[in-house]
Image (cartoon, rainbow, N blue to C red):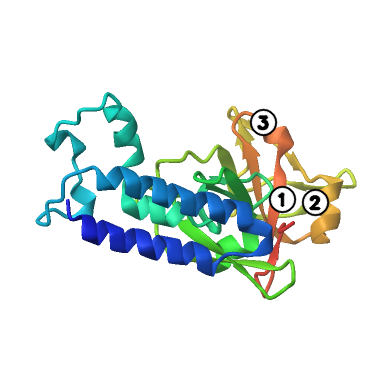
């Protein structure tokens, strides 16, 4: 374990926190910096083996006199993860929403953010990606930047059934969807099923007959289907907020 290399990575992590410090996130930044120093105090008591890399730390290689080995193992985790999620503006994309977009969480600060569907599509965001919130000046506008691509896309299950580019038709004075993008009749339990579009979604997307929409519903709940995207020439109409 090369303690000097670890110290350098911790220093960068602290600098990252300071750079993103704002009045509205002072408690989170303070908590992160304090945890870094707590980590360094634990690290100081461990042996330094310069031939090892920071990611190969094995605290079992040297016996510890204290009885809190398991606690130290939990604290001395991957420096990479510590530095990423100690920043309160870094989030892990964890869940797709039925109404479009995704939920991203910061496990270190126990915070979550909603990423709009338009951002998901424009930035090609996937589950297990790590993103950073980008604030625009003094406004409330937030953008998201991918800082690390996920490597385990199957880690988080998508509980939705998604039907893409379905044509909206009128049936009994209601807007509905009856076929998928390939012209196949939509079925539930092997029986034809008509998806009724909610008035809220009709108004939200200004829907009319002939529009192409993406629809999602939870498994075994097709009657709760929601429109979460309307395809247009601009491809920018999503249920963002």
User: In this rendering, would 182 be left or right of 38?
Assistant: right
Report the side of 180 relative to 157 (left or right). Answer: right
Q: Give the distance between the C-alpha atoms of the residues marked 3 and 1, in whole angstroms.
A: 14 Å
Residue found 18% across the figure and 40% down from its top: 58
Position of residue 157 relative to residue 18, above or below, is: above
Rate crowding at label 1 as few (under 14), some (14 to 19) or many (20 or more) other CA atoms within 10 Å.
many
Residue 94 % position (x, y): 51, 45
Instruction: Confirm whether residue 127 shows in the render.
Output: no
Q: Quadrant of residue 121?
A: bottom right
Between 47 and 201, which is closer to the camera in this rendering?
47
Look at the image and tell me whether residue 31 can be seen.
yes
Q: Is residue 215 left or right of residue 174?
A: left
Residue 227: image tag: 1
Look at the numbered disc 1 and give the secondary structure of its residue: strand
Label placed on residue 240: none
| Position in image of residue 60 (x %, y %) | 17, 34
Crowd around label 3: few <14 · some 14–19 · many ≥20 (10 Å): few
Q: Residue 228, position in %: x, y?
A: 69, 53
Quarter location, residue 117: bottom right
For the point 34% across and 31% down, which residue is it? 71
Compared with residue 75, is residue 40 higher up or lower down, i.e. above or below?
Answer: below
Q: Quadrant of the C terminus?
A: bottom right
Marks 3 and 2, the one that precedes in the sequence: 2
* Residue for point 27% across, 29% down: 69
Determine the CA span between mark 3 and mark 2. 17 Å
Q: Which mark is residue 221?
A: 3
Discs 1, 2 touching: Cβ within 8 Å = yes
Q: CA distance from mark 1 to mark 2?
A: 6 Å
Residue bearing the label numbered 2? 201
């Amino acid at each position: 374990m090369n303690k000097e290399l670890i110290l350098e990575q911790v220093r960068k992590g602290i600098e990252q926190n300071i750079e993103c410090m704002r009045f509205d996130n002072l408690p989170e930044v303070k908590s992160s910096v304090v945890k870094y120093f707590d980590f360094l105090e634990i690290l100081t008591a461990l042996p330094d083996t310069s031939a090892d890399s920071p990611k190969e730390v094995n605290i079992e290689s040297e016996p510890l006199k204290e009885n809190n080995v398991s606690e130290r193992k939990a604290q001395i985790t991957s420096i990479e993860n510590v530095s990423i999620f100690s920043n309160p503006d870094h989030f892990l994309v964890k869940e797709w929403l039925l109404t479009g977009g995704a939920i991203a969480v910061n496990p270190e600060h126990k915070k979550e953010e909603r990423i709009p569907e338009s951002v998901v599509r424009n930035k090609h965001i996937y589950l297990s990606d790590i993103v950073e919130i980008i604030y625009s000046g003094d406004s409330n506008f937030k953008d998201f930047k991918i800082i690390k691509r996920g490597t385990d896309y199957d880690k988080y299950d998508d509980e939705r059934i998604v039907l893409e580019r379905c044509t909206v038709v009128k049936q009994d004075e209601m807007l509905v969807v009856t076929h998928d993008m390939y012209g196949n009749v939509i079925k539930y339990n092997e029986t034809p099923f008509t998806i009724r579009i909610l008035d809220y979604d009709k108004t939200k997307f200004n829907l009319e007959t002939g529009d192409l929409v993406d629809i999602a519903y939870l498994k075994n709940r097709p009657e709760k289907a929601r429109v979460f995207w309307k395809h247009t020439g601009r491809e920018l109409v999503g249920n963002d907020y």
